[in-house]
Amino acid sequence: MEATKALLKMGLRADVVAHVRATKADIDQALRCDARWVAVFLSVSDIHLDAKLRITRQEAWARAVEIAEYIRAHGLKARFTLEDASRAEPAFLLEMCKEVSGRGIERIGLPDTVGVLRPRGMYNLVKMVHDHIDASRTSIDVHCHNDLGLAMANALAGCEAGADQIHTSVDGYGERAGIPSLAEAAVALTLFHEPSRDLGLRRLRELSQLVADFTRLPIPVATPIVGDDVFKHKAGTHVAAVLRNPATYEGLDPKAVGNRRKIVLGPLVGKNGVAHLLSVLGLEHGAREAEALARALKTLHGGDLVELNLDWDPES
């Protein structure tokens, strides 16, 4: 409660949402924090109803109605998350969605709680709900888990079907394999949906590093967008092409997301990469010298010779 109160008092532009179970006691606790938004979650799959909540579908439906009415009576805005929606019986899920939408809930959350859907399945799930509720009154978000490595693809498929919000976390941290990464979602939505919108992408690498420092969990070097190796070029043919035009092997400018371009000089480098290294060092050289050094580098057994950690600009 102290943490929630502190966040609500920060005056953020973002909506701070108090995450609660579908009980009056939890909503009362959110009210004591002066929350304006609550995110209520209630399981709807048979396995969750039986093994977790130990209630029937009819009891779950009655609880959803009761809590939706309680939320409205206290003037709160709400997201109603139907937990394990991806494994729920479709007709029952749809009736629950129509019920809470009809009672004034602003947002419905559709989670793939154990990460078992494919993108086509997530598209169909969201489309089914979107087509049967008043989308002008109740919007949809998706909460996708990454157990099969499909969370980001599933989230984007949900957006294509009508969802307008993706749940993310910094570097995708979360239960088990986590959920979509904030960096990946922000970049994907900017590139594919709203290229003119400024989401502050230049802060992404900085934000990931901040979380890594606090959690003491280093960022894996191959992490998309923010990893150390994402804009690192090592193979000779790649290096030669990037030196002429970085777009040959980069889908976006590393500076745009707060990362850096790196050129590696080691056993895999070619004469073009060596020539660039020599020019960076201010050494006079010709094609013969570059070729000789490239051959020598291929005999290295102790790893790479040097990594140029440069924000290299071909026009500079």
Image (spheres, rainbow, N blue to C red):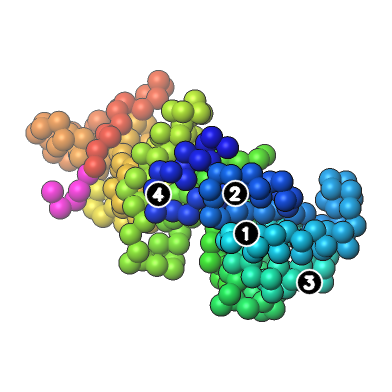
> In which quadrant will I find the N terminus?
top right
Q: Give the range drawn in magenta.
A: 312-316
Q: Residue 31 carries which label?
A: 2
Instruction: Judge from the rendering whether residue 20 lies leftward or rightward of residue 298; answer left or right.
Output: right
Q: Tell me if residue 147 can be seen.
A: no
Instruction: Please tell me whether mark 2 or mark 3 is closer to you in this view.
Output: 2
Rounded to the nearest angstrom, the CA distance separating label 1 from label 4 is: 23 Å
Instruction: Judge from the rendering whether residue 6 lies leftward or rightward of residue 59; answer left or right.
Output: left
Disc 2 residue crowd, few under 14, some 14–19, many 20+, Cα 10 Å = some
Q: Residue 150 placed where, x, y %?
A: 63, 54
Whichever of labels 4 and 2 marks the residue nearer the N terminus, that label is: 4
Q: Is mark 2 on a helix, strand or loop?
A: helix
Instruction: Please tell me whether mark 4 or mark 2 is closer to you in this view.
Output: 2
- Majority secondary structure of the magenta segment? loop
Q: Residue 74 carries which label?
A: 1
**Relative depth, front residue between 45 and 2:** 2
Pointer 4 residue: 12
Q: Which residue is drawn at 53% across and 62% down?
A: 165
Question: Residue 40 colored magenta?
Answer: no
Query: Disc 3 marks which amino acid?
Result: Glu
Rounded to the nearest angstrom, the CA distance separating label 3 from label 1 is: 24 Å
Rounded to the nearest angstrom, the CA distance separating label 3 from label 4 is: 35 Å
Disc 4 residue crowd, few under 14, some 14–19, many 20+, Cα 10 Å = few
User: Mark 3–mark 4 contact, CB under 8 Å?
Assistant: no
Pointer 3 residue: 95
Whichever of labels 3 and 4 marks the residue nearer the N terminus, that label is: 4
